[in-house]
Image (spheres, coloured by chain):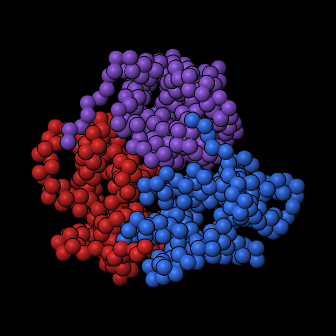
Chain colours: A purple, B blue, C red
């Protein structure tokens, strides 16, 4: 039951990430195929790098065609309804935020189950969430947004830390999963609402 | 016999890809060594990423010094005959096109043999062909050409699809290999001749 | 005893690489977190890619929290003493040069122990040294310095070649390790002092 719900949330996050990648591709006037590639990489790049770092290959999406179908669906949506999709900015932002919540959870959980120590497991949760978007930006020849001002990597780290902490406290998996995802989501929403950002480095 | 021929075609493709990488490096005024690195990555990056995604490590070129020798040969050719090589544009284009044909075939075949499902095996054929060139462009600080207007990723996908289809129909390996490579090559040549391209995404 | 010394030198190199990454991030006005990510990738990216190419996963730093601590220390140092650190240019350059010496040694040694042939083992020594800095530059939207004029990849290749040669000659591990590291360091220092660089490719 928990696993099914997480799977559905994972697909929702994948859809939101794919749409964000495809929109960036459309802004750069790429063709349909290039957009699909960017969408795929944005949505699945984080989990892919995590699995390659951990030695879990063939990487996870090879076992499940639904991820591919979600990306194709995203291309269709953006291609057909480009203007309308832009107007759904808030809905997409919500989906995206759910996405980083569930990606963080999946990354931390998988790493811990493979015997990775807690600090690196937390980092792997963040890697699962941020690497896809960073790769999208590199391919589109931008400095990754994540490196500049987004506070959401921090939200992932704090969410991952929450998971590890509650896990050590003996909190059950179901409760812990939802607290972890909520932590990521709430921190991100609050940081946007109150314009919280990390201090910049001095030159 | 088939395997030997494919191996030779693979080396020809590797040479063409390496030369294309080294020429890009020369356009950016890199030194001999930087050019060699770009040549190596352009030629072998696709197979490398495919093997890392599939968990086939040490990746394939570690077992065969000929790939390294071909890249060194390519550096020598471009360094010594830069101007003349540019004039061989059509020959290089032909070699490059043979290259993507054989790279696609190798990628699909290897993925299927590892139990990857058909749609992802087709994608791995394309990954083998396009990732090297995309990495070359990222390292040279350009948006990957492949994402912008090249129809050749589509040629790879259609060629890979042909392989899977004929395989399911019970067509033998030798015939299938040559039909697959020919499909990739013919689609690419036709798309260039008739200026066929995919529709662009709308903003 | 040798292993402990190499471990200490590895951490010193990691610190120098992390600081160089974090300074580049500061020049781009990234926030503390982005700077930490760039520092981590600059310092540990080379070994990570080497381990992924060789199939040694989970990659090496997962087993040792000290690498993470060194990167966090580097962020603290640059954040607190930005101006002073810049003045320590020569010290940092020395640490960095020690770093590429020890990274080359570790890369060659590990590859040979996994049965990789000598030429590719030498290349893996160089990969360990240069990939981190190249990734830093790609993420910061610059053409990797290494591809443009740095002679230090060549220093790594010559150092790695020295290791392989002395190994074949039956020279013991301890002597060989220090000759290898010294070769890398001396070639780099000489090339800087006498402005030696590789010939550029012609257009």
In this orientation, which residue lies closer to the viewer: C12 or B138?
A: B138
Q: Pick the residue in front: B24 or B131.
A: B24
**In screen coordinates, is C21 left or right of C88?**
right
Q: Position of residue C3 (x, y in %)?
A: 29, 60
User: In the image, is A151 to the left or to the right of B99?
Assistant: left
In this orientation, which residue lies closer to the viewer: A76 or B52?
A76
**In this rendering, does residue A50 appear at all?**
no
Quarter of the figure that contains the N terminus of chain A? top right
Whether A200 is drawn above or below C23: the answer is: above
Q: In this view, does C144 lie above or below C119?
A: above
Q: Which residue lies furthest to the front in this view?
A: B194
Point out residue A22 in the picture as x, y percentages from the top left corner.
57, 37
| Residue B56 drawn at (x, y percent) | 59, 57
Residue positioned 56% across, 26% down in the render? A86
A108 sits left or right of B188 in the view: left
From what the image shows, is residue B203 above or below residue B154?
above
Residue at (40%, 75%) from the top-left corner? C202
Quarter of the figure with residue C144: bottom left
Residue in the image at 66% along x and 57% along y = B152
Residue B175: x and y, percent? 83, 67
Q: Is residue C31 visible?
A: yes
Write the residue at 45% across / 47% down.
A141
* Above or below, comparing residue C124 to residue B147 in the picture: below
């Amino acid at each position: 039951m928990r696993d099914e719900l997480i799977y559905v949330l994972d697909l929702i996050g994948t859809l939101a990430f794919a749409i964000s990648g495809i929109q960036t591709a459309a802004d750069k006037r790429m063709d349909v195929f290039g957009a699909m590639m960017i969408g795929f990489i944005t949505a699945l790049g984080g989990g892919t790098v995590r699995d390659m770092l951990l030695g879990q290959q063939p990487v996870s999406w090879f076992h499940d065609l639904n991820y591919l179908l979600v990306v194709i669906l995203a291309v269709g949506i953006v291609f057909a309804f480009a203007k309308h999709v832009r107007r759904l900015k808030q809905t997409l932002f919500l989906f995206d935020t759910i996405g980083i919540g569930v990606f963080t959870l999946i990354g931390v959980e998988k790493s811990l189950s493979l015997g990775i120590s807690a600090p690196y497991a937390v980092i792997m949760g963040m890697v699962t969430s941020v690497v896809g978007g960073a790769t999208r930006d590199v391919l589109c020849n931008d400095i990754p947004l994540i490196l500049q001002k987004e506070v959401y990597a921090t939200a992932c780290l704090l969410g991952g830390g929450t998971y590890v902490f509650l896990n050590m406290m003996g909190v059950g998996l179901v409760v812990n999963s939802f607290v972890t995802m909520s932590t990521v989501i709430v921190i991100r929403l609050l940081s946007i609402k109150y314009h919280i950002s990390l201090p910049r480095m001095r030159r």
